[in-house]
Image (cartoon, rainbow, N blue to C red):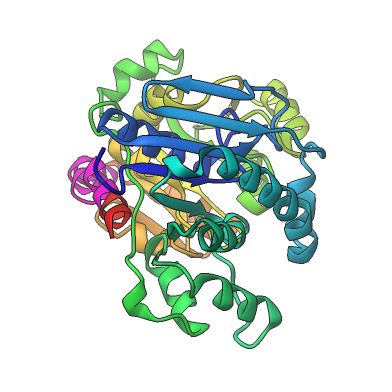
Amino acid sequence: MNGGNRVLILTPFFRPNIGGVESYLDDLCENLRVNDYKVYVVTYQPLTARIKAQKIEKKENLEIYRFSWFGYNLFHKLEPYPLLEFLYLTPYFFICTFLFMLKKGKDIDVIHAQGLNAAFVAKFIAGIFRKRSIISTCAVYNFKKKSLFAKVVKWTLKGFDKILPLANFSKAELIDIGLPENKMDTYYLWVDQNKYIPKDKEQIKERLSLKGEFIVLFAGRFIKLKGADIILDIARTIQKPIKFVFIGDEGPLLESIEKNARENKNVMLVKGIRGRELIPYFQAADIFVIPSQYDEAFGKVIIEALSCGTPVIGAKRGAIPDILDKSVGRVVVPDAKNIKKEIEYFYDNRDELAKLTVNCREYAQKNFSIANIESIKKHYHG
């Protein structure tokens, strides 16, 4: 293989763990694998999903090494405490990666770290084993400019050969803490535009037993940070005949959503589906809503919905305004009043909604196709 074609992906989170990062990495590894890259993944067994995977999984050009670690869902509980989260994830991950490199280091050209915890590990591993290193940010960190956290991140990332911020919001905050812009290359996520495609909404609705419904879709973890409670409150109070479909399996709000789905005809809960199984719901929905209460790094569900021809109402937080524009959706302060107002507007003004719906597919193909992966791959080769 050519230099740079043997890649080690370092990430605490990988399939069958569920999430946007896991979905992006699965797509990345599959694309690399079928395009003559040899890919190694060092990761943990799922930390936020009750499922076990193979310790070592191999197929052509892909080897995944999963290390067991304690604390189901402890990661989410530690999210408000960065130091504790770091201590939970990073030291043992360093040991796992070091042991892997002792055995496989000669087969690696470049180390690609995903997120800050993996970056801290990669900084030392790349130095010890003299490997090229790049880092992709996978979150928004809201640095306080002169804080110890910001200083540690700056010290960690400045040693990488390339820094890949996820969308412009991430790039701006990294520049703000003093990292050099000339070391960065912004990347955007993508979906397979041959899989995520629009179809006749009424036909898909009928197939899903939602014939004739005006559908507002939410997909994600049922937690307040994701805004699931806001959509549920809107569903409880709205007077118009709108169907609110929730897709998900986990989170402290699950019980409340289940109860409302049993008691209210305008609330529907769909459990047990993931990944591309969501495509028919994206295709059927009239509006997709992502009411995040925190600064989203990206929101892959947004581009999945757009690719399926569904306009998006998104939170005015993080990178979401960088992804959406008025031709395909709306960006609003994510409270119940604003989101409800937009939903009701589009319910009453179907012609306006139809214009956005027509624009979605072209917008997604232009901005979020598989071509986006090239902004990552080119840095493997120096």
Q: Identify the residue shown where x is 43% and y is 76%.
A: 172
Q: Which residue is nearer to you in this view: 378 or 369? A: 378
Q: Position of residue 233 (x, y in %)?
A: 66, 45
Q: Identify the residue shown where x is 77% and y is 30%.
A: 255
Q: In which quarter of the image is residue 120?
A: bottom right
Q: Is residue 366 magenta?
A: yes
Q: Which residue is nearer to you in this view: 173 or 56? A: 56
Residue projecting furthest to the bottom:
146
Q: Identify the residue shown where x is 31% and y is 20%.
A: 202
Extent of the magenta region: 351-374
Q: Does the magenta stretch include residue 67?
A: no
Q: Position of residue 50 (x, y in %)?
A: 73, 26
Q: Identify the residue shown where x is 32% and y is 78%.
A: 182
Q: In which quarter of the image is residue 149?
A: bottom right
Residue 292 visible in the shown view: yes
Q: Which residue is nearer to you in this view: 179 or 105? A: 105
Q: In this view, does 186 lie to the left or right of 55?
A: left
Q: Vertically, is 119 above or below 271? A: below
Q: Is residue 326 left or right of residue 27?
A: left
Q: In which quarter of the image is the N terminus?
A: top left
Q: Position of residue 266 (x, y in %)?
A: 58, 28
